[in-house]
Image: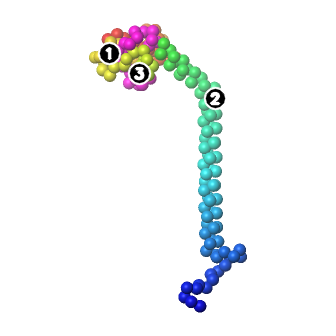
């Protein structure tokens, strides 16, 4: 026997070497783990999606969305009714600044500083005897306050 010839190693029943059979088994186990992990992740994702959809379709959630839409529409119409087109406005409301900026942008021109604005707008809590009681645009819990500066 020459030194380049090897003695045959152990052989599996199907004729392959035992090391090759172990590698093949390890690959199959790895693939099975990947498939199992992906199946669990997919199942959890579907379950979460169904829970979210169910929550959004409940009557309470739908009523809340309808009120929010009507409130936005009321504020939008109030801005267009009480402000002249192209008016320079200052939004004097840190809580609703983004909302008022979006609703007024196509009609008025929001200003960064009060000094450059001719009008000031804000949303105040609406209550029968509170700060919003004298305002024209009472919108589902909020009142639009428009003042000339």
User: Is residue 116 visible in the rendered structure shown here?
Assistant: yes
Q: Secondary structure at mark 3?
A: helix
In this picture, residue 60 sits left or right of residue 92: right
Residue 17, how many percent across, how many down? 64, 76
Residues at marks 1 and 2, CA–CA distance in whole angstroms: 43 Å
User: Mark 3 touching mark 2, by CB under 8 A?
Assistant: no
User: Mark 1 touching mark 3, by CB under 8 A?
Assistant: no
Residues at marks 1 and 3, CA–CA distance in whole angstroms: 14 Å
In this picture, residue 74 sits left or right of residue 131: right
Which tag, 1 or 2, sits closer to the chain's start?
2
Specify few, some or many for label 1: CA neighbours under 10 Å numbering under 14, 14-19, or 20 or more. Answer: some
Residue 109, how many percent across, how many down? 37, 17
In this picture, residue 60 sits left or right of residue 79: right
Q: Is residue 80 magenta?
A: yes
Residues at marks 3 and 2, CA–CA distance in whole angstroms: 31 Å
In this view, which residue lies farthest toward the bottom? Answer: 1
Q: Is residue 92 magenta?
A: yes
How is this picture coloured? Answer: rainbow
Which numbered disc covers residue 22?
none
Q: Secondary structure at mark 1?
A: loop
Q: Mark 2 — residue?
A: 58
Write down the region rendered in magenta: 78-99
Q: Mark 3 — residue?
A: 101
Which tag, 3 or 2, sits closer to the chain's start?
2
Q: Mark 1 — residue?
A: 117
């Amino acid at each position: 026997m020459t030194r380049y010839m090897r003695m045959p190693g152990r052989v599996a029943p199907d004729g392959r070497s035992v090391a090759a059979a172990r590698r093949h088994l390890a690959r199959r186990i790895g693939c099975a783990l990947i498939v199992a992990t992906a199946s669990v992740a997919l199942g959890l994702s579907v379950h979460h999606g169904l829970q979210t959809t169910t929550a959004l379709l409940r009557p309470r959630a739908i009523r809340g969305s309808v009120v929010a839409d009507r409130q936005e529409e009321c504020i939008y119409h109030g801005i267009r009714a009480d402000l002249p087109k192209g008016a320079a406005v200052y939004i004097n409301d840190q809580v609703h600044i983004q909302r008022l900026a979006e609703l007024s942008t196509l009609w008025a021109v929001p200003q960064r500083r009060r000094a450059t604005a001719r009008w000031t707008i804000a949303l105040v809590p609406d209550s029968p005897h509170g700060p919003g009681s004298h305002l024209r645009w009472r919108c589902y819990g909020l009142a639009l306050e428009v003042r000339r500066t």
